[in-house]
Amino acid sequence: MAHLRIFSPQWDFNYEHPPLVKLLIGLFIYLNAHLGHLLNELFTARIPSIISGTLLVIAIYWLGRAPFGRAVALLAALCLAVSPWLVYFGALAYLDMTMTMLITIAYLLLWPAIHQPRLYILSAMLVGLAAACKYTAVLVIPAMVLFVAYYFLLILPRLPVEQRPPFPWRWWTGAIIIAPITFLIADPAIWPNPLRLLKHSFSFEWHHSIDGHLTFIAGQYSLHIPHWAIFYMVFAKMSGFVTIPAACFAIFALIQLLRFHLRKANLSTAEVTRIAFLFIWLVSLLGMFSLLNIVVGTHYLLPMATPIALSGAFAWVTLFRYRRGTLFLPAKKSMPTALAMQTTDTTMPVKPHIDLRAAVVLALLTLFLVGPHLAGLVSVSGVEGYRWYTYNKDLRGRLKFSEAVPDAHSFPYDYLVWPMHLVQRGYSIPAPWSSHIVHVIMGGNTTYCFIMARDLSTIT
């Protein structure tokens, strides 16, 4: 890309995913090299994920205040800020954190877009950029369409005529056009022949999903995972103090929406819209991401983290009946003093004071929603969830593991595992071992590493 070699055959590498995040990683490495290698190259490659994870937390609070209230938005943001799941993948050179950040902001923008329809264009652009990071970003589109349709077809007729915003057909049409255009601009890998290469990429994904992808989950290997595995993964990677209330919120929200539409609940349209906004996001993403039956890691499901955290916080706040803005109470008028009676002032200035009950409630909510994640983050290092499972405990009793330095002159081992990224960086497989490959570990068309044996005659 730096040399504008748009027609280079090297775009063919790793056609499972579009190249936007890879280009961002390359850009940071390029800048770091030209600035005198101020940072370690591996850390430099992780910068896009670090920035995206940070922006994600900020966006949850900043954009979540209007629909859900400051308490819910803040608790959800803090919950995810210390989540081992998000922190782990927010510190790796993966595609998912950037994609998750983009589609999360895209959905949250639908709330202010109700009264500022030009934001539909920005939301569509973010979806296009997210799809250029990873194709699974498009799974958020049904939730976005469903909420917009729900609001304009079912909520709007319940509002007084003078309060009904007009249908923004022009902005919707622009959003439908701008999303694919943004994707095409952000995917230079398909510029040489957009239709053929995009078809090739989609075809690969389609056949890849049919054929399956070797997956390890719950101690077993399989080519496809069941659709219910999304619940297993989410419950394993997030605190039960978040996931169980989120499930309760889904039930509560469904009941409230049904009662509203059956005209058996005295709920304001604003409150119903707020509940529907989060309910549609949660349920739709659960349904769409459960269709991914070739998940090879829980990073595939990172977009679920935000609606689950917000739903869990919403459930706790509703349960404790915490009202918006009750932490600080306004100043009360004090009784007149003798000094005041001698002047024109009849009161002494009194600062706003803290509502003790609200402070206790917020402290408890913070303990429930943030505490378990924080405990997992500080107690278990380098793991993507606060629950840690161990398999093949006797492996270290049967094998001794040693680090092999790539540029060493000899490799005195019985087996040698050689990652593909070393080959790509110029460290080819050592000559004596290159003809002793016993297994190649692959994911789709991507080679991860080679396993070689010193003496093939001992392999059974």
Image (cartoon, rainbow, N blue to C red):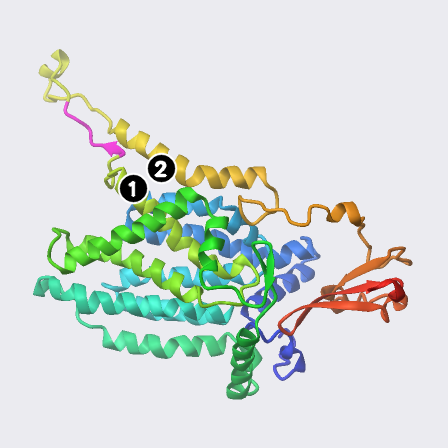
Q: Residues within 10 Å of mark 1 (few under 14, many from 20)?
A: many
Please tell me which residue lies in front, 251 or 156. 251
Q: Are marks 2 and 1 in contact (CB under 8 Å)?
A: yes
Residue 32 magenta: no
| Residue 77 placement (x, y as % from top left) | 41, 47
Vertical relation: 449 (above or below) 204: above
Q: Give the amino acid type for the residue marked by disc 1 in the picture.
A: Val
Q: Is residue 13 above or below residue 313?
A: below
- The residue located at (35%, 63%) in the rendering is 284
> Does residue 61 appear anywhere in the picture?
no
Q: Secondary structure at mark 2?
A: helix
Residue 420: numbered disc: none
Q: Position of residue 263 (x, y in %)?
A: 11, 57
Segment colored magenta: 327-333
Residue at image coords 79%, 67%: 438
Residue 365: which disc? 2
